[in-house]
Image: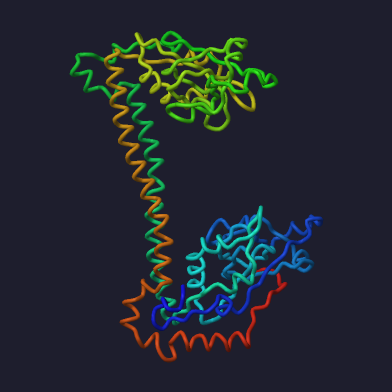
Amino acid sequence: MSSSKLPEHWISITLDDALLSIVGGGTPSKANAFYYQGDIPWMSVKDMNKDILEDTEDHISEDAVKNSSTNIIPAGTPIIATRMSLGKIVVANFDTAINQDLKALFPASGVDKNFLISWYRSISMHIESMGTGTTVKGIRLEVLKALNFSLPPLAEQKIIVEKLDSLLAQVESTKARLERIPEIIKRFRQSVLSAAVSGRLTEEWRANDGASLENWALENLGSLAEVATGKTPSRKKPEYWENGTVPWLTSAATGRPLTFDAEQYVTERAVKECTLKIFPPGTLLLAMYGEGKTRGQVTELRLSATCNQACAAILADESKVTKGFLKIRLEENYEETRKVAAGGAQPNLNLNKVRDISIGTPSIAEQTEIVRRVEQLFAFADTIEQKTNAALERVNKLTQSILAKAFRGELTAEWRAANPDLITGENSAAALLERIKKERETTTAKPNKRKAKA
């Protein structure tokens, strides 16, 4: 911010002018294992994941502190990263040693610590953009010291901090509520699927149609659909892969409800010599293998494709079951499908287990009605999810917007007008700067080698 845009009674200085000192750290020798068996917290960039720290991942001994360039920083001191995690600033609730990628900022007594922290966060993206380096970005201390720092009178600094605390707490509360909505939507979708395959979703429809749950037949998947799988052509034969035109899918495709394209393709020669089956659009693909959440997922093909042996390709007999209803049942049965998988470190399904999945089937008319209602309810859930994501994006931007307004003086314009005596004379920023200069001349926050307080 240039001085011409500063509110009246604010002064533009450098960050260095606002600090008594900047203290760095170091890393005790990794060759001495005993250095890392102590009880003194030792902070590095990997700890810069919260605004306020309760502990560090690593701890070192007193000897490690004495025999290295690390320094113990008092609790509550703002700590920034000068290498990786640029723009981050945190405070530890405990005395901690720091490594060479971190710097502790010791503000002058005329600079409110929380005002300094909020200001630093307001320009975090700018600081990140100033990083240099090819693989790991860093910022030189001289560049940080030269950052433009807008200094209001001390009383106004405290008012800005109060307003930010209140406004940002509201933002965080709103964000927390929005972040809970996706889980609520997930449970809603599962309850819709459960109601669909149990008949609860169409109770009223059956009553009007004169049907009942007794009309539902319990069959296994193998009697309602053709179930097959695919193969992986030899990777040692380039003629099976180079310039391929036939879509070849893996279980990764099941992460999407609908599959329109493929990441890999095989040749017509591979299809012929490896006797690969080509599955038409409308085929359901169920993941039989896969770590994490993959196994048990299902997608519907919107293209003709072959697949590997990790997938079960399911082609519904539409005279008995619609593919839409079958897909709903497989999605609802996700957790149960995963449970029946067999194996050691990575449990897998097989075609027989897939064929044994039980399906309660109502009439085709009721299946069609169930699919219609599920699609309608899921469309409603999708709309809520999209609005939630849009709102979260706005809220995430709101924090930076509020911070920017704070350090343009916009949050305290009315306060300044109502309290001229607190921003002029001896209370002015100019008088404050003179006191800071005298303090800098007589006091310097020195690094220490004392053991951190318990």
Across the whole image, how many numbered discs are drawn on residues? 0
Instruction: State how the image is colored.
Output: rainbow
The residue shown at (46%, 30%) is 256
Check the image and name the residue furthest to the left: 208
Residue 392 to residue 153: above or below: above
The residue shown at (33%, 41%) is 384
Image coords of residue 380 (percent x, y): 30, 36
Between 389 and 139, the one nearer to me in the picture: 139
Image coords of residue 39 (percent x, y): 69, 61
The residue shown at (56%, 77%) is 107
Picture quarter with the C terminus: bottom right
**Residue 421 found in image quarter:** bottom left
Check the image and name the residue furthest to the bottom: 425
Tell me if 305 is positioned left or right of 454 in this view: left
Tell me if 355 is positioned left or right of 374 in this view: right
Between 199 and 374, the one nearer to me in the picture: 374
Check the image and name the residue furthest to the front: 243
Residue 191 to residue 40: above or below: above
Tell me if 22 is positioned left or right of 156 in this view: right
**Residue 330 found in image quarter:** top left
Image coords of residue 146 (percent x, y): 58, 74
Image coords of residue 362 (percent x, y): 31, 14
**Residue 90 found in image quarter:** bottom right
The residue shown at (46%, 24%) is 298
